[in-house]
Amino acid sequence: MSTYVYGIARRSHPRLPGEAGGVGDPPRPVRTVGAGELTALVSDAPEDLRPKRRDLIAHQSVLAEAGAGGAVLPMRFGSLSPDDEAVRTVLAEREKHYLERLEALDNKLEYNVKATHDEEAVLHQVLSDDPDLRALNDANRAAGGGSYEQKLRLGERVVAAVQQRERHDGELVRQALEGAALTISPGPDSVGWLANVSFLVDRDRTAEFVEAVDALRKEHPHLVIQLNGPLPPYSFVE
């Protein structure tokens, strides 16, 4: 039977899950597999493992429980090894590297911030900021909406202005929050988000980081900001 791997910690980690329920139905008991100064959090792997909500939550819960007691290198959901012995081999071969990464992540957590625009608010803002665009919009309204060509011209100008504002505000989000973080990791570009950034935050500064997010919301109400965390530092682990 394959071994499912949740994460890697020091063998001296003070809070490793005992018989916590892991992935699978019924949940597989979580155990540890050690080599040298390292230990891996593992369980037997279900034969029909799929990214179901129950299993995703179980994976996250194991890491959250262990992470509450110290640094853990989180594995992505679905990380499998042929067996426990293969896990021990990897721990032994890469012990120095994993210990270095654990030291780098001691007392640190990840927060992910995604941002988008309130469409109505940003439209009002781009019209307020551009007198020519505002005049064109007013002229179209006075003409009962304007001709097809006028509507097309206005639409193209508005789209260009909003896209420029998205680039500006994406940088604004990063700059406003990076001072409360140790480092950042930009997430993949995705439709609908003008910013998708993960921040590595010192555990003792999490309240400061959350306050910075709240301040950003208040200062820029045209931004819709989604804060996720604290999370295991997925974005800062190779």
Image: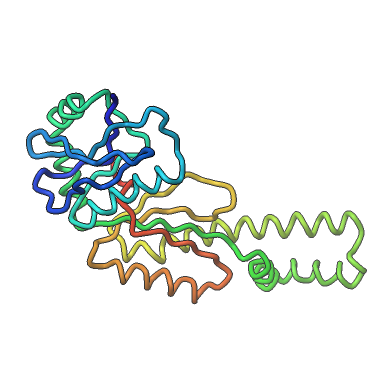
Whether 140 is drawn above or below 110: the answer is below
Between residue 57 and residue 192, name the one nearer to us: 57
> Residue 7 at what x, y percent from top left?
25, 41
Whether 138 is drawn above or below 11: the answer is below
Whether 124 is drawn above or below 81: the answer is below
Q: Quadrant of the N terminus?
A: top left
> Residue 220 at what x, y percent from top left?
53, 72
- In the rendered structure, the answer to whether residue 88 lies left or right of residue 195 reads left
- In the rendered structure, the answer to whether residue 181 lies left or right of residue 94 reads right
> Residue 139 at what x, y percent from top left?
86, 70
Whether 43 is drawn above or below 115: the answer is above
Q: Quadrant of the C terminus?
A: top left
| Residue under the image location 36 percent in, 31 percent down | 46
The quarter holding residue 128 reads bottom right
| Residue under the image location 66 percent in, 64 percent down | 119
| Residue under the image location 15 percent in, 29 percent down | 88
- In the rendered structure, the answer to whether residue 201 lies left or right of residue 168 reads left
Q: Could you tell me how many numbered marks the image carries?
A: 0
Q: How is the image coloured?
A: rainbow
The quarter holding residue 117 reads bottom right
The quarter holding residue 74 reads top left
